[in-house]
Image: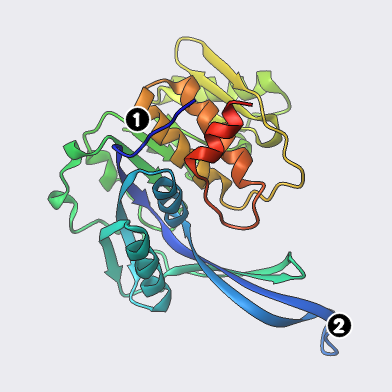
Amino acid sequence: MRLDFSKINVLLIGDFMIDSYVNGNSTRQSPEAPVPVIKEHKIDLIPGGAGNVAMNLKSLGANVSCLGYIGNDLPGEVLKKIFNEKGIDHKHLQIEKILTTVKKRFLSNGKQILRIDYEEILDNWKPRSISELEIKNFDIIILSDYNKGVLNNDWFKNLKFQNIIADPKKNNFSFYSNVKIITPNLNELQRTTKVELKDFDSIQKACNEILVKTNLEYIIAKMGEKGMMVVGKNNFLKIIDPHFVKKPDVTGAGDTVIAAFSLAYAQYEDVELAAKVANAAASIVVSKMGTATVKIHEIESLLTK
């Protein structure tokens, strides 16, 4: 199967952040407390949250424009520098007088032992530049919601656009009233519906409960090692079988899923095919360490096996 997303224009709206990895080795325990002492040897700074979605979209060949906010600080500068190097449009990424969100992970001998988060949330934030955007020039709009402020009020509901896809974090999915498709994981699905998700039937039931109460057309339920379930109105149901991955690292996998799914859906307008592409992309990215991206040839190779 040949994939080509080079003509797809994406507006990515969401919470942009930096994933920081402090890598080191530990051979002894601190005399002050029962914790390991790490000898640091490398720090990696990588776009996270919506930033990771942007990196995956670009890695898959799409044209990406970002809308959100970052702080007037070093992590914000790092994010812009990386986006400049990758050719990701960030002119609508507003600079605010806050801290850029950073998730700082400490790894000892390759294993994460601690995470520290730095963040400031603007609950009533609205973009200043939305009127400058030519919405009609985009093929798809992605909402990458990490509950960090960009999508915490309903300004985005004024966007008149047919294909909006969201990775949801709100407890009430009806909040995404102008969204066509959402991509929740099972924890998010269970938290929203209060349905105990013990098998495929209960997952489908939970999805159908949401579809009845909202304007959504499809729900892509991310089931981890069980693959994906696509549930739509009018009893539409498809289960996408998983690809086996030994010792998966799920960091940022949801970002890869929504990036790959959105591009495939924009290109082919086939929800089942898009889910298969996203499922393959997720299987590839969880086989990599930390926040990572996937390339088209990797997906093509896996889908043809």
Question: In the figure, residue 195 lies in which quadrant?
Answer: top right
| Residue 153, numbered circle | none
In primary-sequence order, the first of circles 2 and 1 is: 2
Please tell me which residue lies in front, 272 or 206: 272
Q: Position of residue 50 (x, y in %)?
A: 43, 53
Q: Residue furthest top?
A: 234
Q: Position of residue 64 (x, y in %)?
A: 32, 48
Determine if residue 180 is in view. no
- Compared with 150, 110 (above or below) is below
Question: In the figure, residue 162 lies in which quadrant?
Answer: top left
Numbered disc 1: secondary structure: helix
On the picture, is 286 further left or further right than 33? left
Task: Tell me the quarter of the image containing the C terminus.
Answer: top right
Q: Give the residue type that dot 1 points to.
A: Ala
Tag 1: Cα neighbours inside 10 Å, few (<14), some, or many (≥20)? many
Q: Give the residue type that dot 2 points to.
A: Arg
Numbered disc 2: secondary structure: strand
- Where does label 2 land, which residue? 28
Q: Position of residue 103 (x, y in %)?
A: 55, 66
Q: Position of residue 15 (x, y in %)?
A: 41, 56
- Compared with 237, 255 (above or below) is below
Residue located 45% across and 22% down the image = 271
- Compared with 244, 125 (above or below) is below
On the picture, is 245 further left or further right than 43? right
Residue located 50% across and 46% down the image = 255
- Where does label 1 land, which residue? 266
Tag 2: Cα neighbours inside 10 Å, few (<14), some, or many (≥20)? few
Residue located 86% across and 89% down the image = 31
